Image (cartoon, rainbow, N blue to C red):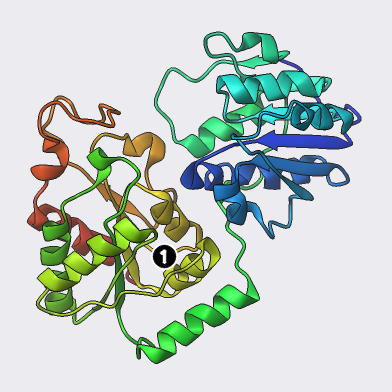
Amino acid sequence: MPNIRSEKIEKVLVIKLRSIGDVLLSTPVVKNLRHNFPNAKIDFLTEPQAKEIIEGNPFVDEIIIFERESKNPKKFLNLRKRNYDLVIDLFCNPRSALITFITGAKFRVGYAFRGRGYAYNVKLKPRREIHHNVEFNLDALRAIGLEIVDKKIHIPLSEESEKFAEKFWRENNLNNQLVVALNPSGTWETKRWGLEKFARLGDKISEEFNAKILILWGNQNELEDAQKIYSMMRTKPILPPKTNLKQLASILKRCSFVISNDSGPMHIATAVDTPTLGIYGPTNPYAQGPYGEKHLWIRKEDLDCIACNLTKCPIGNKCMNELSVESVFEAFVKLVEKNKN
């Protein structure tokens, strides 16, 4: 593998097309690139849904939006005209591999998964052992001899998002309160713990800790789920208004704790340093869990099929359906203890 710290690197492109959580877990890469190449222009290529995660990042000069629906070949050729010296593909699917190849960069770095090796002239091999996605991303820098100085994930907040959250906090009398946010959403059906269980958990935390409960939501389906939880709870929770990602981050920053399915909001909560409990089943918390020392995760350990990575379950989604409210509450108590000052 080459050591490119001595090379003249003036233009760098990082590719991470999606999703929100995965893009967030790639943000340590750009900070460490800036450390190694302080005068380089560093661009980030992603899809529209993840744009907000990178917007305002002090280590990124330009965000380039990739529209999957667009069939115009000029979108590729325009990247070639930018004359990148170094392209790091952290997504490594067939499309991102093709984009990397077309740039014609002197150094094209990526994991050479099946059928994609042609695109890269610095071909990476994943470690044999399971390790967190943050480390997986940073391995791309280690492979080319770059120094790693910071592993923290980062979402930039805005003045508008901070004012939005302050207003919400003030209007709901949440200052000086213990506030616990519950996030029942998840992109896969198999990653979602039951709504009735979230309701029971919310009641238990509210009663045992005298806590205010927030139920997070994003799209219309998630709002309907949040409303169902609201209707099931004895102690009525608070449903925030519709938010963008930065507004959500500013709200999560003010929470005392977050309990969440494996999802983008869970990773946003860890990025703003709010102690977070992740609920896991089909995905692997060792690779995709809440990142950082403040956080914990819980799953039903006695299943042979745990961490199956299936989006549809042939046996009734046991990992979620058999994970009890009592087990998650006990894990929450451990999270509280872990973060006592």
In the picture provided, is 281 more to the left or to the right than 315? right
Using the image, determine if residue 234 lies above or below residue 328: below
Is 268 situated above or below 74? below
Q: Residue at x 35, y 73 (%)?
A: 256
**Where in the figure is residue 246, as x and y percent of width and height?**
54, 65
Looking at the rendered structure, the secondary structure element under dot 1 is loop
Give 281 or 32, whichever is nearer the viewer: 281
Question: Residue 223, relative to residue 5: is it above or below?
Answer: below
The C terminus - image quarter: bottom left
Amino acid, disc 1:
Thr
User: Quadrant where the N terminus lies?
Assistant: top right
Q: Which residue is at a point 23% across and 60% down the rendered structure image?
A: 225
Q: Is residue 157 above or below residue 55?
A: below
Q: Which residue matches tag 1?
A: 274
Q: Quadrant of residue 289?
A: top left
Query: At which x and y percent is residue 9?
Result: 87, 32
Write the residue at 67% across / 9% down.
118
**Left or right position of 104 against 185:** right
Place of residue 242 in the rendered image (x, y in percent of width and height, measured from the top left): 43, 70
Query: Picture coordinates of residue 193 (x, y %)?
Result: 19, 49
Q: Quadrant of residue 336?
A: bottom left
